[in-house]
Image (cartoon, rainbow, N blue to C red):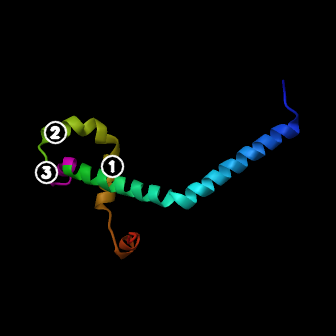
Amino acid sequence: MSFPPFITRLGRGVKSTFRTLAEIIYGATIHEMVRDLRKERAHLEHLFILIVFGDILGIPILPPYYTLHLLPYIAPNITGWKRSLLRERDLTDLCDQEIG
C-alpha cells in the first residue's frame, strides 16, 4: 500500500523539522562541552604517546619492552603526533585556550 505524495512530503518535512530542532537544541546545550572534552582527550592522547614513545624524539621514559607491546595500537597516530608536537607555536595559540 502506497501513501499519497502529499503525505510522503509532509512526513519528510516533519522529520526534517524534528532533526533541525534536535540539532539546534544540541548546539545550544552541550556542543561546547563535547568540543572541550574532545580537545582534552586529544591532549591526553598526545601526553600518553609522549610518555610511551618519547624515545622517538630522544626522551626515553619507559623501557622499549613496553612500547613494543603498544606499538600496533599507536602506529596510525604517530605521524600526526610528531607533527603536532614539533610544530612551531606562537602567542596566538595561547589565545585559543579558554579561561574557565
**Measured Cα–Cα span from mark 1 to mark 3:** 19 Å
The span shown in magenta is: 52-61
Residue behind mark 1: 79
Instruction: State yes or no: residue 59 in magenta.
Output: yes
Residue 69: give x, y in percent of width and height: 20, 35
15 vs 72: above or below: below
Q: Which of labels 1 and 3 is toward the front?
A: 3
The quarter of the picture where the N terminus appears is: top right
Report the side of 21 relative to 13 (left or right).
left
Residue at image point 28% right, 35% down? 72
Is mark 1 in CB contact (under 8 Å) with mark 2?
A: no
Residue 73: give x, y in percent of width and height: 30, 38
| Foreground residue among 12 and 18 | 18
Q: Which mark is residue 61?
A: 3
The quarter of the picture where the C terminus appears is: bottom left
Instruction: State yes or no: residue 20 in magenta.
Output: no
Amino acid under disc 1: Thr
Q: Which mark is residue 66?
A: 2
